[in-house]
Image (cartoon, rainbow, N blue to C red):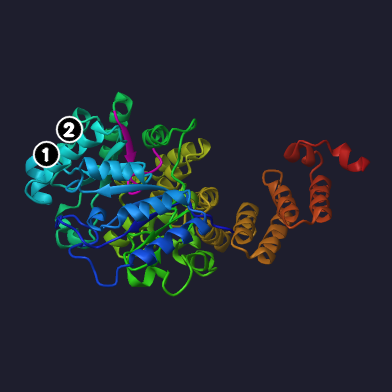
Amino acid sequence: MDYLPVTAVWEITMGCNMRCDHCGSSCAEPLPDELTTEEALDLCDDLKRVGLKWITLSGGEPLTRTDWPKLAGRLTANGIKPNIITNGWLVNEEMVKTAQANGVETISISLDGNRETHDAIRKKGAFDKVISAFQVLNACNHVSASNTTVTKHNLHQLDEIKEILLENNVDLWQIQIGLPMGNIAEDRESVVDPSVIEYLIDYSHQVTMEGRIKVFPADCLGYYTEKESIVRQISMNVPTAVLWQGCNAGKRSFGILHNGDILGCTSIRDASMIEGNIRERPLTEIWNDPDAFNWSRSLKKSDLSGLCGECAYGDACLGGCPNTRLTLNGSIHAENQYCVYHTTMEVTREKLAVYTDTEELMETAWAYANQQKWQLASLTLKRVLELAPQRLDALELFGFVSYNLSNFTQAKEANEEVLKMDPENPYALKGLGLSLHRLNRTEEGIASLLKATEAATPRHMDSFYDLSIVYSELNQPDKAREILEQGEKRFPGYIGRYTGVPSSYYSAV
């Protein structure tokens, strides 16, 4: 698969004129190995060659790097739209006009609370500098934005922050949570609880519906709620609902560190995640390396643990923000509790835990399955199997539900349990065969499906049709047709029932 980079974040310096409590990069002074102006300008040209469209210049505090106008100008000349994230301390009329002259599109200024809170997080006078910066942006008719890092210290001030932004005619507002990396790693207690994510989505939706400022939920906020999709649709100005489709790190975006190191995301900055350095290899070579960004490009739902590895949305979502999983649970492959869908399912699991009537639970599981609410059906069946591990009908249904969740290993294991108790069970033989096929064990899968056709009864005839589909996927149309004809011979009228094609069609061709 070809990956085309669209956007990037470039930490042009580690130097900063503040020492923010929540700084994820623990920035202080410029580092001696930062790219020179000449190296940085060459990188701007390489970014054009790789096809980049947008880039965010950050830091540190990017405005402390005095050659930032040259970099912005070169990027613009190369057809790349630069944006800047700044703490606002150095924003004045001259700076904004310089940014405009060099093609900077959006200038985003961090605001993390009222005067008392913001100054406590950053430094005394920082809040007033933010307000002054917004006023300058307004006076210069420049697009203004703000980004807020939410922790327990400022969660209760979101309304106050919103009003400050509205009073200063800010156009865009990104909301993100502080994760335990950099300086926050020393204050993990300040990280909000998973339940807060739903509140932040609801709040973003509320503000979006007010229509006075455009809200951008960061990638660490989600996933798979109607409100989130509406907020993302409106913020991205697209005609249809936007569903989270997984992290773009190493696929459509990447990060650049101060010294030219290339990684999937500047937030995931462990040395093991660095794909190369532009001083040693051209950017295009790093990006196009088939082994690069493997942690992201090759990630599969089955690699994830916990609910993420079983989730109905797992194949697309891939666990949400990988940095959330890494910083909070220590692994890219860990589950992500900071997810509204995950939280909702956990609440459901807790409610199910008090039920002990397996018949009632089975009725509920069947109701969910008939409505194709596979995740809820799965949770309900897991409770049944906790109470009655050998219950045959629960195992049969669990195999079916797991298959529909694309949890093929789980489906395989459930069907194997059924077959231990009922070796000729046609339903389990079919389920096992299909699961093995999806697990790339097609030869074994076909063998099990053939056994299912042999064991078929008038109530369990669909194994013929399912096996024909497998043969069709393998580009073996003759075998697909032959197995359907066998089904018709065993059960007259079968073909019409399962394919919608009259039996006479097959006898005529």
In the image, 303 versus 116, the foreground residue is 116
Magenta segment includes 217: yes
Left or right of 29 in this view: 504: right
Amino acid type at mark 2:
Ile
Residue at the limit of the structure toward the bottom, as seen here: 280
Q: Provide the residue designation for mark 2.
A: 164
Can you say whether 366 is above or below 46 in the image?
Answer: above
User: Which tag, 1 or 2, sits closer to the chain's start?
Assistant: 1
Q: Provide the residue designation for mark 1.
A: 114
**Residue at left 50%, top 63%?**
298
Q: In the rendered structure, are the residues bearing label 1 and label 2 in contact, judged by CB atoms less than 8 Å apart?
A: yes
Q: Estimate the x, y position of residue 315 in percent, counting from the top left.
A: 50, 52
Q: Quadrant of the N terminus?
A: bottom right
Magenta segment includes 33: no
SS state under label 1 = loop
Q: Estimate the x, y position of residue 24 in percent, counting from the top left.
A: 24, 58
Distance, label 1 to label 2, CA atoms, is 8 Å
**Residue at left 27%, top 42%?**
96
* Res 20 seen here: yes
Q: Estimate the x, y position of residue 41 in percent, counting from the top left.
A: 40, 61
SS state under label 2 = helix
* Res 336 seen here: no
Amino acid type at mark 1:
Asn
How many numbered marks are there?
2
**Residue at left 41%, top 72%?**
279
Q: Which residues are magenta?
A: 213-225
In the image, 353 versus 390, the foreground residue is 353
Please, what is the dominant secondary structure of the magenta stretch? loop
Can you say whether 330 is above or below 163 in the image?
Answer: below
Q: Quadrant of the C terminus?
A: top right
Left or right of 497 in this view: 205: left
